[in-house]
């Protein structure tokens, strides 16, 4: 069990990476106007503040409380921040801790966590300290992405304006088409090693065949989806499941959540400003909306297997770590790693194409599949974070693959999967279509 007592260099590296992950959650709060914290809080702001407190409470409970037996100093706030955001979003009332209480809680939690991460003593319960710190880092980075989407929901005047940098390459000559992908063998998930580097839903690896299919070379754009809207797609009952159509009617949904009508024109609701709808950027929608569009088009969303084959397969029937190869993700490969707040036009990242010439499969928006989120054969609950994934194995959550502008590089690994309900709009999710 020598790995339990980390070497000094290892402890310092992990502490540095944890600090870097904190910068990603901090920048969401720093994007808010300071005066906002002294006004009556909306439900959206209350949810964001509680969400930000959740990641601090998670780190403290795992790295200070569990590993080293640190004593709580505020059980009220521990309890308030304990639940995963999805568990309280529908019942939250804006009467919880404010920004100042959150800031003080975060300060004390971080001081305690940092001391424990750098502590040379073995962990109290024999847990793998490095594995626990890695879990905390990835948990925080995943929630940094979720916080950015909650930030989008707040009024623009509540935020400090920020401008996205231009994409490294923008080709106005991008011509969406289709790509024929030959059949082959696909490896889903990851092999379980002595120190797992992923979450429980990523294990255990399994290899499965996938027949040949045809897939869109690019994600479906706002411009293409506008044709569906103008054709009355949201009002056509034939294109929706019964439950999805009831949702559309009940919520009065007539267009994507990121669109806003202005007279005869459409605006795109970015994180910090409204702009004329970019027809050449990927449309961000729920799976229910993507499925209705697919039926309207006479095609299908890809399965998880088809996505993997298009993204990571090769003509030699091998598999790559990333669509572009085995090199670590870099800026030219895609719109990810917190480089931007919003999606970029299609064709902006030609260096990220897969071996088959399929564009932007990683970054610029998670991609919906038609696969139900289920465990792989040999699944076991994570001993560090119990039942993290089992609550999503309910038949109502679906697999998303790829990554968004706010997805950390370390979460772009081939085995990583995201789960969302079909009508979920709280994620930067895009899609493309296949023909079997």
Image (tube, rainbow, N blue to C red):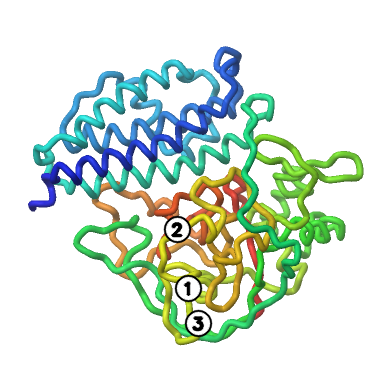
Residue 308 appears left or right of 5: right
**Residues under numbered marks 3 and 2 in contact, where contact means CB atoms less than 8 Å apart:** no
Q: SS for tag 2?
A: loop
Say which residue label 3 marks.
210
Say which residue label 1 marks.
312
First-in-chain label (3 vs 1): 3
State how far apart marks 2 and 1 are (Cα): 12 Å
Q: SS for tag 1?
A: helix
First-in-chain label (3 vs 2): 3
State how far apart marks 3 and 1 are (Cα): 13 Å
Could you tell me which residue is drawn at 45 percent across and 49 percent down? Answer: 408
Q: Residue 412, which numbered label?
A: 2
Residue 95 appears left or right of 194: right
Report the front residue among 289 and 127: 127
Report if residue 396 is visible in the image. no
Q: Spot the residue most to the front.
A: 168
Residue 272 appears left or right of 266: left
Q: How many marks?
A: 3
**Residue 399, image x, y percentages:** 51, 61
**Residue 209, image x, y percentages:** 46, 83
Report the front residue among 310 and 30: 30
Q: Residues within 10 Å of mark 2 (few under 14, many from 20)?
A: many
- The image quarter in which residue 306 lies: bottom right
């Amino acid at each position: 069990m020598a790995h339990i007592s980390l070497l000094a260099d290892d402890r310092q590296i992990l502490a540095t990476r944890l600090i870097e992950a904190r910068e990603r959650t901090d920048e969401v709060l720093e994007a808010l106007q300071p005066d906002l914290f002294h006004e009556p809080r909306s439900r959206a702001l209350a949810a964001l503040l509680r969400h930000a407190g959740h990641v601090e409470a998670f780190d403290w409970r795992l790295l200070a409380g569990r590993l080293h037996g640190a004593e709580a100093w505020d059980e009220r706030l521990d309890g308030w921040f304990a639940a995963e955001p999805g568990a309280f979003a529908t019942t939250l009332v804006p009467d919880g801790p404010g920004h100042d209480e959150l800031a003080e809680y975060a300060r004390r939690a971080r001081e305690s966590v940092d001391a424990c991460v750098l502590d040379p003593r073995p962990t109290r319960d024999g847990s793998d300290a490095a594995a626990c710190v890695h879990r905390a880092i990835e948990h925080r980075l995943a929630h940094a992405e979720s916080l950015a989407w909650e930030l989008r929901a707040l009024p623009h005047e509540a935020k400090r304006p920020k401008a996205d940098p231009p994409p490294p390459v923008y080709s106005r000559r991008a011509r969406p088409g289709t790509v024929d992908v030959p059949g082959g063998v696909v490896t889903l998930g990851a092999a379980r090693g002595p120190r797992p580097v992923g979450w429980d839903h990523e294990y255990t690896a399994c290899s499965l065949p996938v027949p040949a299919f045809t897939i869109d070379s690019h994600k479906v754009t706002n411009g293409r989806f506008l044709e569906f809207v103008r054709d009355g797609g949201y009002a056509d009952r034939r294109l929706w499941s019964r439950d999805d159509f009831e949702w559309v009617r009940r919520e009065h949904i007539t267009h994507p959540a990121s669109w806003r009508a202005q007279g005869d024109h459409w605006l795109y609701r970015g994180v910090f400003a409204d702009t004329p709808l970019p027809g050449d950027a990927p449309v961000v929608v729920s799976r229910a909306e993507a499925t209705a569009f697919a039926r309207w088009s006479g095609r299908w969303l890809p399965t998880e297997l088809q996505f993997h084959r298009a993204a990571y397969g090769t003509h030699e029937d091998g598999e790559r770590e990333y669509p572009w190869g085995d090199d670590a993700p870099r800026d030219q490969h895609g719109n990810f790693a917190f480089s931007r707040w919003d999606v970029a036009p299609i064709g902006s990242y030609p260096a990220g194409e897969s071996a088959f010439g399929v564009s932007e499969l990683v970054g610029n928006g998670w991609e919906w599949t038609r696969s139900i989120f289920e465990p792989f054969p040999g699944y076991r609950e994570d001993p560090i974070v119990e039942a993290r994934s089992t609550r999503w194995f309910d038949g109502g959550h679906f697999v998303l693959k790829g990554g968004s502008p706010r997805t950390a590089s370390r979460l772009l690994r081939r085995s990583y999967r995201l789960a969302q309900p079909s009508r979920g709009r709280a994620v930067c999710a895009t899609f493309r279509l296949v023909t079997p």
